[in-house]
Amino acid sequence: MAAGRLSSAVLLLLNMAGALLAPRGALHPGPPAAVAEDDADVEFFFFPFLVLYKSGRVQRFMGTDTVPAATDPATGVASRDVVVDAAAGLAVRLYLPSLATNSTAVGAEGGRLPLVVFYHGGAFVTESAFSPTYHRYLNTLASRARVLAVSVEYHLAPERRLPTGYDDAWAALRWALADARSTGPGAGADPWLSRHADPARLFLAGDSAGGNIAHNMAMRAGREGLEGGAAIRGLALLDPFFWGKRPVPSETRDEDTRRWRERTWSFVCAGRYGIDDPVINPVAMPPKEWRRLASARVLVTVAGLDMLSARGRAYVRALRESGWRGEAELYETPGEQHVYFLDKPDSEKAAKEMEVVVDFIKGGQGSSTSLSMDE
């Protein structure tokens, strides 16, 4: 398996090198007149995700594959795509578990399911709610946790830099809540949300950049409120992407690495937010700002070999020490890299992490602590 991953990495590097070193005409098959003179000149190389050329063209090297919505044969979960705002280009993929076996939910909550709004990762520049990686993850989550999941297809940088992705995430969250609260066939709401989603059991979740987005949606909900006074019952941040100017305990102090992180952050937001802005560095927030976090419970997961893990631990410490009135849980998987649970979904550790997320959504009942290293 290690050899396979190495081969994949080598192929990716060769692909990127070929794209960057190819003759100008080779980058754009077709009539030479259609090729801009500076199109082969690189503006920014965001390794390993993409190249932005000075012409404005973007070439991505990963995270571009998609799969159609369908009923998943392995889990029985049905999915469908919904356009939220055609003018804005905002869409979501909905996931609905098989209702025939949902006796627990029917008995406990009148037939409605918890509502999970999920934001995918990808450094704000790649991946999709429609990718095979996230399609598989959401099918499993919806099946195991018995939830109606809304996976948000937000706009990516550099074509649409932050805060566009944040605004898309907020608009999708408000839409999902409004349709979940709608009643009656003539209300114009999405039928899955209006019939099956319980807005009183709302959860936000996301991995990596999506974890950053989920956190910022909970902060915005604390400032502005949500549709109908809805409350966020839980916030699940899976290997979330946060950073800052000064290292937190056990975080790298390598100056080149820290400068590169700062450059890439400036790239995705066009310099709008500094590296210590609360949207990227909540650890630096004063306690009164932490207390605005609009969730009763927070789960943060980190992977032991992930460069971002120190910041995830610091997030939990800062939250607990702020006076925020809620329950914060840290779950750490030793010996694994960033979002390993997406890269190795069939592994034992990935299964255990999924169990932790499912237990969190179900209210913390059950025990999945063999890999938990809570500080």
Image (cartoon, rainbow, N blue to C red):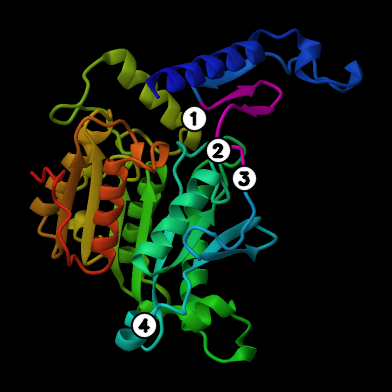
Badge 1 element: helix
Q: Quadrant of residue 279?
A: top left
Badge 3 element: loop
Q: Is residue 341 positioned above or below 21 on the image?
A: below
* Residue designated by label 3: 66
Residue 23 on image: x %, y %: 75, 7
Residue 50 within the magenta-colored segment of the rendering = yes
Q: Kindly report the distance in space between the C-alpha atoms of the residues bearing marks 3 and 2.
A: 18 Å
Residue placed at 45% from the left, 36% from the top? 123
**Residues drawn in magenta:** 49-65
* Residue designated by label 2: 157
Taking depth in this image into account, of 50 and 145 the one nearest to the observer is 145
Q: Earlier in the sequence, mark 4 or mark 3?
A: 3
* Residue designated by label 1: 267
Residue 28 on image: x %, y %: 79, 20
- Foreground tag (2 vs 4): 4
Q: Earlier in the sequence, mark 3 or mark 2?
A: 3
Examine the rendering and report whether any part of residue 129 can be seen.
yes
Q: Are marks 2 and 1 in contact (CB under 8 Å)?
A: yes
Q: Quadrant of residue 12?
A: top right
Query: Quadrant location of the C terminus?
Result: top left
Q: Kindly report the distance in space between the C-alpha atoms of the residues bearing marks 4 and 3.
A: 33 Å
Residue type at mark 3? Thr
Residue 320 is left or right of residue 290, and the answer is: left
* Residue designated by label 4: 103
Residue placed at 49% from the left, 17% from the top? 7
Badge 4 element: helix
Residue 216 within the magenta-colored segment of the rendering = no
Taking depth in this image into account, of 135 and 158 the one nearest to the observer is 135
Q: Earlier in the sequence, mark 1 or mark 3?
A: 3
Q: Earlier in the sequence, mark 1 or mark 4?
A: 4
- Foreground tag (3 vs 2): 3
